[in-house]
Amino acid sequence: TEIGSISSEIKVLQEKSMDMGLKLRNRKAAESKLSKFVEDIIVPPRMIDIIVDGEVNDEYMKTLEILSKKIKFIEADSMVKTSKALKDVQPEVERLRQKAVSKIFEFIIQKFYALRKPKTNIQILQQSVLKYKYTIVFLKEHAKEIYAEVRTAYIDTMNKVLSAHFRAYIQALEKLQLDIATSTDLLGVETRSTGYLFSIGKEPLKARSSVFALGERINVLKDIEQPALIPHISEAKSQKYPYEVLFRSLQKLLIDTATSEYLFSDDFFGEESLFQDIFAGPIQVVDEYFDAVLLNCYDAIGIMLMIRIIHQHQLIMFKRRIPCLDSYLDKVNMSLWPRFKMVFDLHLSSLRNANIKTLWEDDVHPHYVTRRYAEFTASLVHLNVEYGDGQLDLNLERLRMAIEDLLVKLAKMFPKPKMQTVFLINNYDLTIAILKEAGTEGGKTQLHFEEVLKSNIAIYVEEVLLEHFSDLIKFVKTRTSEDPASSSDKANIGDVEPLVKDFANRWKAAIELMHKDVITSFSNFLCGMEILKAALTQLLLYYTRLTECVKRVNGGSVLNKDLVSISSILYEIKKYSRTF
């Protein structure tokens, strides 16, 4: 029927339509693939012009990236390898690759050679080269041998440039060095034997005080982040510095240069390993200089400051997250400690083996060796506050024992026991004062000296009282008891009368003599007055025991008129106490 024929026609039309749709889709897909293939394989004339004749700039970089994609497309796509178009295009692409490689090589090498020019700011030049880092990626991917040549050229250039830079810097620094200590500048060495003819009995020239005292040298740790010294400016001002200042400056320059170089190598070449090859030369230059200096360094405080500087620089590099100098900084630290120990042991031996006869002076005031020791100890304690180095504490303990032995030996040179005690008190007192002054809370060392000072003051008090009131003290100690209720007293009026009358006649004059003795004997006025107060208090205790005894003696009341009232003695004690 007619409807049936229309229906079959519609079916035919539908089939034709579907067939045409499929063919269209296939044609579109083929066209898309073909146009993509043509686009990927064809080399436009503009691209050839840029690669062959263009300057290396941003446009050149973009064109290089396109060329790289074409090379990879030709190498990777299996369909390309079977196409006839490849035979026409491949030689052209290869010629462009070779041209690009030779152009990049010349361009980059020229940039590297510019680094060799004197007075070039390396960091600024490196920053300007970074925008061409795709050239390195291109060489890595498409010309490995040429990349290796570029890499070697850069390593060689930077190694030489930086080595020369550090060599020149070191030569300039050497002119600024202030020598602090020689091998004879030791704690226990007699002043005259160090060759300072005009400084007999006194410490030599002011600069020498830096051998044992930290003083302003501590500032080098406060300036840890400051830029490196500019030698010609310091030289123009005729400034000289202890070695640790130059050491900080050189190490600061090294860590800053290393940081910059490490980041550039990683960014530009994508290789951290380059750094070690570049820096082998500069580190060797710095090492050779440092080893030579350390070999002749007898400045223990300077060495300890350098140990602390290295520690601070390790922290700086850790904060920067730059690991490239870890092994170098460890190595420097490891070479500083044995040298410190060696110089410290020289100081220790100088105290242990000191010549007592040449060191001794007939003077009870503090000995210059004590001042040296106290300043030296205070300096090292101060430099150990934040570090708590147990080994250093042990060494300082050994040094303390040696100075104590030496002071006791020197004290024994005085013929009178009282003078020996005065000498020890003056020296212990000075040591404590210097340790306190350093603001280090002197730790165990200070506590120890406070204990020995206390026991020697007690000895002096007894000695000075025996000098003036020996009979009274002997009587009180042997014939009376400290307990008033005790009936062990067997004294009679004949025993106590001469003591009571002698004390009544002489006590004020004796106290005045003791006062004069204290004023002339003790260097520290406050310490002297405390000692006098202790002596007078002890005298009051002895006299109180005598008066208690008198009260218990048969017929003792006849001596009441000769007894000095306790309030009179207290008044005198207060009078002398007011003088400080």
Image (tube, rainbow, N blue to C red):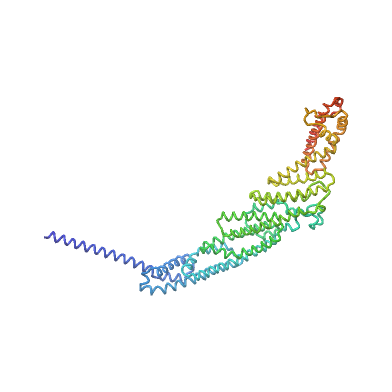
Quadrant hosting residue 197: bottom right
**Residue 488 versus residue 52: which sits nearer the camera?**
488
**Residue 249 versus residue 352: which sits nearer the camera?**
352
Whole-percent x, y for residue 52 in the image: 46, 72
In-image side of 20 versus 123 (left or right): left
In-image side of 370 versus 288 (left or right): right
Q: Residue furthest left?
A: 1
Whole-percent x, y for residue 5 in the image: 14, 61
Quadrant hosting residue 569: top right
Whole-percent x, y for residue 284 in the image: 63, 64
Quadrant in which the N terminus appears: bottom left
**Residue at x 83% of width, y 44% of height:** 417
Quadrant in which the C terminus appears: top right
**Residue 567 versus residue 498: which sits nearer the camera?**
498
Count of residue discs: 0
Q: Is residue 478 above or below residue 242?
A: above
Q: Is residue 394 above or below residue 149?
A: above
**Residue 238 versus residue 448: which sits nearer the camera?**
448
Whole-percent x, y for residue 353 in the image: 77, 54
**Residue at x 30% of width, y 65% of height:** 28
Q: Is residue 565 above or below residue 96?
A: above
